[in-house]
Each structure stands twice: as C-alpha cells, then as structure tokens.
Image (spheres, rainbow, N blue to C red):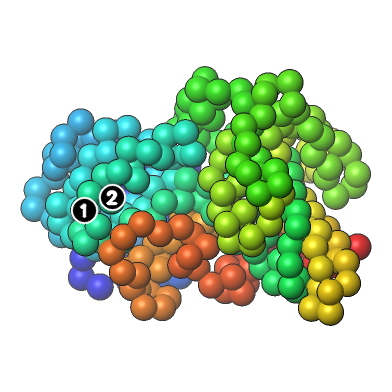
Amino acid sequence: MERSVLILGGSGQAGSDTAAMLRRWYPHLPLTIAGRDPARAQRVADELGTATAVTIDLSRRDLGLPETTHSAVIAALWDDRLNGLHYAQDHGLPYLSISSGLLDIGPEIVASAQKPSAAPVLVASHLMAGIVVLATLHAAREFARIDTVRVGVALDDTDTGGPAGIADLERWSSVTSAGLVRRDGVFTWLAEADAPAPVHTVDGTAILGQSIPVLDVPSLALATGAPNVRVDFAVGETPSRRRGEPASLEIRIDLDGTDQTGDRLHRTHHLVHPVGQRSLTALGIALGAERLLGLNGTPPTPGVHMPESLIDLEYAVGRLREVGATFSHGIP
C-alpha cells in the first residue's frame, strides 16, 4: 500500500496502541499519526517507523490537511463536528469511528446515509470497539436459539483510559443515567432506579454496576435474535488489583436458550485481560481497520457497517488470545 492510514487522535492511548498493533501485523503499512500536539504525534510516529506525523484541525472539513494521500480514516477520538467523516466521504475513503456511542450516533448515521456510495463507514462505538460483541457472538454459535444474553463488564477504576476515553464516558453519563435493554423483544429504557445491577468477576466478586445505553445492546439483540439482552458496566477494584497484581478487565457472558436438539442450554463464559482494557480496545479498532483496507478479506462495499457484520468471529478470538486475553468457554 502506497497511501497511509490516517489515524485521528493517533497520539492518544487508543490511537497509538492501534497504530502499534497495525505495525506489528503489517510492518510495511504506511501510517499517519494525526493530532493537535505536533511534538507528541511525531514521537509516536518515530517509535513506529514507516509513519509520519501531521497536525489536524477538526474544525475544518479538510482537517487542515493538503490533498489526500491516505487510504482510510480512523477516528480514535470524538469527531464532534463529523469533519473526519466528511473528509473521508469527500475523498472516497473508508472511515471508522469509536466514540459516537448510542446517544450520539444519529448525526453520524444520517451523514453516512446521505452519501451511501461515498465509502464504507464502520461504526465501532461499542465497548472496546466491538470486542465484547464479537466474543459474545462467538460464544453463541453452539445455540440453535438464544432467549437471553446478559453481559457484565468489570473495569478497574484505575483503568478508565486516557483523557479522550474519560471525556467520552463523562459525555455519555451527562446525557442520561437510564439504561437500555431488550425485554421481551422490545428495546426498553430503564429508569435510573432500575439500572443498577451486580457484575460478577471470575472469582465470584460482585462489583456494583448498571445497565448502560451502548451499541452492544442492539448489536447483540439483532445478531442473535434474543428477545432479552442486557449489558451492565461496573467500575471498581478488580480482583487482580486486590491481590496486588495489575488491574485486569473482566467480562462475563451469560447465554440461555436451546441447543440443536431443542434441549435447554445455559453457558457462562469469561473473557479476561490481565492488564486492562487498552489492548482490547486497540484490537477492536485494528480488526476494523484491517477489514476496511481489505487486508483480511474483500474490502467492504460502501454504506454503514458494524463490527459484527465485517469481522470473522473465529479470527477475532484468535487475535484476542494473541494479545494476552483468556476466553473460557462452556461453563454450565
């Protein structure tokens, strides 16, 4: 590839980790680290090799950049004016975003729908850029029918991400304290009093969390057909940190339904990363970028896509294990 992948926010945690992962996978893939601090962006580019650094202006439709020499645009930050998306559309480039969230997704979807033939748009504003959804759908493959999906994510309170990630969480929480679930086939908003729920970690510890309005809920509900779907998110001291070890990320996946013979089936799965969420978020973005660029499979058609519509589940789980995650299967 002669043209580079433009990573907006490439000097932040999510962006720089994604760039480093893409560099490991594809040593000769050109990367452009875009940020508002030129010195910081240059440091990241220098560490990567085969990378350049640019300064961007997100208030401008052209991002303050010269004529494009890019192959895709990855928004590893909150593209609040959608100028990253407009830049991609204006130049016919694939675009990936991770920070819109369920509550901010409307303008992004409208802008994408108004130019459906411009380029593929991957909306990956899920937890960890779609990793939770991909892992859950992989676990669900042994079911003939799924009645209930329940996911609990336990994030250590020392592992809430960099400034951009923290700003995203604060923005979402300022909009609503309500949760979103699918109940008996109906997407339902939960009042604040009904949103809290415990999230159980591998060792049985319960951390108080709550249902949150994330894209994972409709993605899981519509991909599985399950009439009952809930995703709870908890922030607290994870068991690993309590033992004096690095702060881990723990995800519990509970599935209920029937097997191929019609018998009732329940499975509990645990996805754990021993040093927190950063690697999984970067993995989610890198998997999406890889597919948009056609580096793993045929490039997707123009239009709006979700992680689960593009990324092979078996491949994703293999990459999960490569970055140090453990994925336990089939606990009754």
Q: Is residue 42 left or right of residue 275?
A: left
Q: Quadrant of residue 303?
A: bottom left
Per the model, the C-alpha gap separating discs 1 and 2 is 6 Å
**Residue 26 placed where, x, y %?**
40, 71
Secondary structure of the residue carrying tag 1 is: loop
Secondary structure of the residue carrying tag 2 is: helix
**Residue 97 placed where, x, y %?**
39, 48
Identify the amino acid type marked 1. Answer: Lys
**Residue 127 placed where, x, y %?**
57, 46
Q: Quadrant of residue 153?
A: top right
**In the rendered view of the protein, which quadrant contains the N terminus?**
bottom left
**In the rendered view of the protein, which quadrant contains the C terminus?**
bottom right
Q: At 36% across and 57% down in the image, what residue appears?
A: 304
| Within-10-Å neighbours for mark 2: few <14, some 14–19, many 20+ | many
Q: Nearer the viewer, residue 231 or 262?
A: 262
Residue under numbered circle 1: 115
Contact between marks 1 and 2 (CB within 8 A): the answer is: yes
Q: Nearer the viewer, residue 111 or 158?
A: 111
Q: At 60% across and 47% down in the image, what residue appears?
A: 217
Residue 112 in sight here: yes
Residue 55 in sight here: no
Identify the amino acid type marked 2. Answer: Ser
Decide: is 54 above or below 143: above
The numbered mark at residue 293 is none
Q: Nearer the viewer, residue 226 or 74?
A: 226
| Within-10-Å neighbours for mark 1: few <14, some 14–19, many 20+ | some
The numbered mark at residue 112 is 2
Q: Is residue 263 left or right of residue 254?
A: right
**Residue 41 placed where, x, y %?**
31, 42
Q: At 68% across and 34% down in the image, what residue appears?
A: 211
Q: At 47% across and 33% down in the image, what residue appears?
A: 103
